[in-house]
Structures are given as C-alpha cells and as structure tokens.
Amino acid sequence: MNITILEKEQEFFDFVAWCVAVEITLKPEALFGFSTGRTTGGVHAAIVKAHEKYAFDATKLSMFGIDEITNISREYFGSCYYMLLHELVKPLGVAVDNFLMPPTHSDDFEQECVLFETALKKRGPTELLVLGIGENGHIGFNQPGTPFGSRTWLSKMDEALDERIRKETNSPLDARLDGLTLGISNIMQSKKILLVANGERKAQIVYDTVCGPVTESVPSSVMQLHPNCELIVDAAAGKLLRMERGNDSCHCPNVSCENHKQCKPCMASHGNKEYEPFCRRS
Ligand code: GLP
C-alpha cells in the first residue's frame, strides 16, 4: 500500500482530486466508483474545481456509487444518488445513462443487488474507486464482521445513521433503512483504489487499517491485501503513522525502520519539520 500524507486538509482534497483527474484523462471511457460522505464530499468539490479550471473530458465516463440507503426518496439530499448526482455527475457532464446506482425503492432488494452487480460487470472492470473509511473501519456499508468474501448485499444500517435519516426524511417506522452495498470482494476487484480519510477522528482507524492485523473486525484492513491501493490522508488523520525526524523508530509495527530508510526516508518533505508528511512504502 502506498501512503501519502498531506499537511493541510485542502491539500488533501486537491491531491485526491488531481489523482482522479489524471485517471479520467488517461481513461476517459472507463468505469469509476465513488463513495459518499463528508470526506468524499470535499474531494468531489475539489474535482469539480479542477474540472472548471482544466476542462478534462468526463462526458464518456461511466460512474457508480458503491452504496445506497434503502426506502428513502432519491430526492432526499442524504441519498447517495442525490449526492453523487449533484456533486459529480452533473458538474462533470457525465451522461445520466452512464451513472449507475441501485434504486432506493424496490420489492426485491436481493434481486437489485444482482442487477447492480451485473450492470457494473458489463461496463467493468472498475478502473478507479475512491473509497472513504468509517470511524469503525467500515467501507461502503460493510460494517465490522462482514466477511471478506461478501458480494453486493443489503447491510443493516448503523443505529446513529438510521436515527438521523429517519428524522430528516420522516420515514415511517416500518420502513427498513438498510444499506445496499458492494461487498468487500467486489470492492477488492477494483483495479486501483484511493483510500481516503481526513481529520483527527480518523487517526486511529487509519492506523489500524494500515498497521493492524488484516481482520474482518476492521473491514478497511483488507486494503493491505489489495495490489494497487493508495492511502491518502491529511496530517490529522495520518498522525499515528508519522515518523518523527531524528528518530528512525517508526510508529508502525509492520514497517521496519530499514524499509523506511530504503524509501529515502519517506521521500518528499512538505516543509513541516515535525514529521515526514509524504511517506511512501511498498
Ligand atoms: C458512510 C458511507 C461510506 C463512507 C463512510 C465515511 O456511511 N456509507 O461509503 O465512505 O461512511 O463517511 P465520512 O467521510 O462522512 O466519515
């Protein structure tokens, strides 16, 4: 896993945006996947800003969201459909026919999972997936305990999010607000993954994701096994990964100091004397 730590939050958003813009420029007709949330909301805004300035062509792109909430209106501002439509699809000029999302309403969500997976397979493979991390390590709606072999499925919503969405949407009590999500094995099939996190509240899970054991209790830890995953974080989210100057001992138990020295200790300096903000290892 490559690791990039940007000092400031806005640098983080811009850096991820540039990685995405480069991939779109190189593969303008490919399939790209996105997740929604606070982290990726900032990333999407930076992508749109870059697009306004440099007008790279996204009109032939196919795009999908990795998860969706069930039994709410697509017009609800918290639906993944709504967020991606307004944050990326429309501003980038992606054809709505090329925007693939599971429905929010259905009589048969299990069948919808199969249909969604089939639709993605037709356009696939996924060239690039921008993946957020939940504070408990969830990826998509795959909560701790989800088998690594899981395929597209209907996951139970976490309680806090369920409560918030019910309030905001006035959902009837009998409506099940589940999370229709790509499974972990689907996510792992993406050719390239940008795993992104910002803010101090993500510092522990970022550390566990990179340095902890690969375990189904921490879904994001499976990324250690992906052949082409880049973790991109801001300094606050990456603070437990940092290697202090003048002290070659690394906070990460999985990375020996020798490895760090080989990567010219963590290649580039961002002018921050406290630690090496750009740490790349393989
Ligand atoms: C949400 C979404 C994920 C997202 C994650 C992080 O529940 N289902 O796709 O990546 O949680 O969200 P945030 O960036 O808001 O912390």
Image (tube, grey):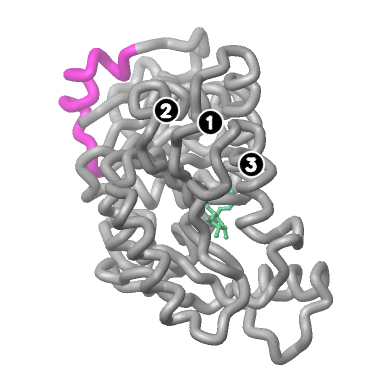
Q: Is residue 9 visible?
A: no
Left or right: residue 47 versus residue 274 is right
* Vertical arrangement, residue 206 with respect to residue 3, above or below: below
Is the CB of the residue bearing disc 3 within 8 angstroms of ligand 1? yes
Could you say where residue 165 lies in the image, as x and y percent from the top left?
74, 69
Mark 2: few/some/many CA within 10 Å (<14, 14-19, 20+): many
Residue at the image position 29 percent from the left and 23 percent from the top = 248
* Vertical arrangement, residue 278 with respect to residue 149, above or below: above
Q: Which mark is residue 41?
A: 3
Residue position for label 1: 234
Whole-angstrom CA distance, mark 2 to mark 1, is: 23 Å
Q: Secondary structure at mark 2?
A: helix
Left or right: residue 69 versus residue 262 is right
* Vertical arrangement, residue 14 with respect to residue 70, above or below: above
The span shown in magenta is 253-267
Is the CB of the residue bearing disc 2 within 8 angstroms of ligand 1? no
Magenta part mainly helix, strand or loop? loop
Q: Is residue 190 visible?
A: yes
Given this view, does label 2 or label 1 mark the residue nearer the observer? 2
